[in-house]
Image (spheres, rainbow, N blue to C red):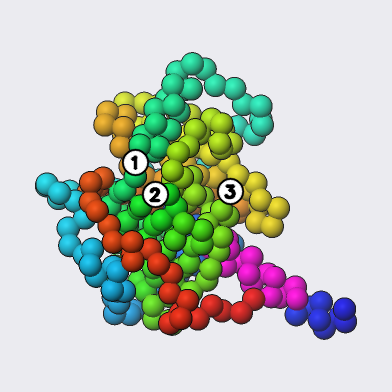
Amino acid sequence: MTRLSKISFAAAFAARSARLAGALLITASLATATSYAQSVPVPKPAPKGRDAGADAQRGPATTGATQAPPNPIIPDPRRNVPANIFQSFDANQKAQAAKVSAYLSSMQTLVGNFVQVGPDGNKTQGDFYIQKPGKMRVEYDPPNPIDIIADGSSLVVRDRKLATQDVYPLSQTPLRFLLSDRIDLMKDTNVIGVTADDMFVSVTIEEKQALVGTSRLLLMFGAKDGLLKQWTVTDPQGYDTTFAVYNLDATKKLDPGMFKIDFTNYATPPG
């Protein structure tokens, strides 16, 4: 391989890795399609476009009284996370993790609204739709032109304004823990922290990937109702993206077309 070819290959690989890092911020990333080394930029204005499958599901995301957007709980950036890979847990922590696992395993569909806080403190809002196993759709309110769609095997971060999308294996994003049909957190993930107080039960999962680095997923559930409240993804550089959910409805029937990835009308950037 010539020196020029090596440089071109390295540049393409770096670009691809940066986009993958962006997908991991969902939470996502999970929701932004940016590099882990940067703050989330404010998207350029764009009209809110929807696919036919999404149009069929528009309307209130919850039955009953509509809640006001919550104020996300932002983790302390100075927090200490156990580094011991042989971290042990007492009976109460194991019981709390078991309750969370049972809740996640019992949930088959979930619809709601969200407030996302990026590493730079900017807030964005929108709607999300989950159908297990493996399917999710995240739609941001205008002017944000980003949609995130998981179809069970792939995940795309789509820019409606540019008509482009980045495609990643769902298995390489933290979303797979939320979208698993059945999950036992203590057995199926690397749990490094379980805490509980009067407000929340929190579980922290750590994941190490050779190409991306170490990321963490902090799941928070209501101490009284046991429902999912928010999650925070911490990227390898230590930047947090928090995704707080509300107006939850676990009974809504969803159109499978919402989770189909359009590979025809949206181009995939090279690299």
Q: Quadrant of the N terminus?
A: bottom right
Closer to us: 225 or 37: 225
Q: Position of residue 127 (x, y in %)?
A: 29, 59
Indicate the quadrant where residue 225 lies: top left
Location of mark 1 (residue) = 107
Q: Amino acid under label 3?
A: Ser
Against 218, residue 268 (above or below) is below
Q: Which residues are magenta?
A: 9-22
Q: Nearer the viewer, mark 2 or mark 3?
A: 2
Numbered tag placed on residue 232 in the rendering = none
- The main secondary structure of the magenta stretch is helix
Indicate the quadrant where residue 139 lies: bottom left
Marks 2 and 1: in contact by CB < 8 Å? yes
SS for dot 1:
loop
Residue 77 included in the magenta stretch of the image: no
Q: Residue furthest right?
A: 2
What whole-number distance in Å separates the C-alpha atoms at marks 2 and 3?
Answer: 23 Å
Numbered tag placed on residue 132 in the rendering = 2
Q: Amino acid under label 1?
A: Met
Neighbor class of circle 2 (other Cα within 10 Å; few <14, some 14-19, many 20+) is some
Location of mark 3 (residue) = 215
Against 219, residue 93 (above or below) is above
Q: Amino acid under label 2?
A: Lys
